[in-house]
Structures are given as structure tokens and as C-alpha cells.
Amino acid sequence: MAKKIDVVVWSKQGCSYCDEVKAYLHELEIPYKTVDVTHNDTLRDILQAKYDVRYVPIVEIGSSEDGVYKAVTEIGLEHVKTALAIDLPSKV
């Protein structure tokens, strides 16, 4: 049985790159959770601590079952596509 993949998109309002990532996930029917960092420096502080970045989008892909996530911190949909192809080869 395949492991369930969880996706978290860290984003902000008005971010075209964020919207592009979410539209792509929607197109593939991949459910995701959103963490909106708009006007919330505390959430950006979390990104800084976890990944040494303060920008969005950051896409975390992993499993809540085992608590292991990897983050796509590079800007550009091609990086998300590559990461998802590794975890979901039949979907992308």
C-alpha cells in the first residue's frame, strides 16, 4: 500500500508564484494545506529557522504518518514538479 503524501504550501496573498503552485496541485487533484504568512512575521521566523529563508512559496512534501517532510525552497514550478514526480510518479 502506498504511503499517503501530505503537501503544505507556505504562501502569501498576492504572490503569483504561490498561486501557480496551488493551481498546479489543484489540477493534479493533490490536496494540500496552506500556511498564509501574509502580515505574519512569526510564520516567516519559522521558515527562517527551518529552511533559512523568509520568502514564499515553500512547498513541504512528506507524510504525517512518519513525520518526514522535504521542502522545495527553490522558486519555480519546475522544482515542485520534480519533487512530486519522485513521490507521486503515477500522478505527474
Image: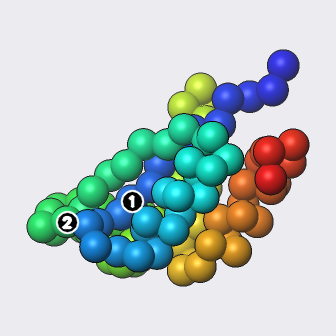
Question: Residue visible at 32% across and 52% down?
Answer: 35
Q: Is residue 90 left or right of residue 36?
A: right
Q: Amino acid at mark 1?
A: Trp
Asked whether the viewer can see residue 57, the reply is: no
Mark 1, residues whose alpha carbon is within 10 Å: few (<14), some, or many (≥20)? Answer: many
Q: Amino acid at mark 2?
A: Thr
The image's mark for residue 10 is 1
Q: Position of residue 28 (x, y in %)?
A: 67, 47
The residue identified by callout 2 is 38
Instruction: Establish if 91 lies above or below 83.
Output: above
Left or right for 72, reference 79: left
Q: What residue appears at the point 35 percent right and 63 percent down from the top-left corner? A: 11
Q: Is residue 3 above or below residue 41?
A: above
Mark drawn on residue 30: none
Residue at the outermost left position = 39
| SS at badge 1 | strand
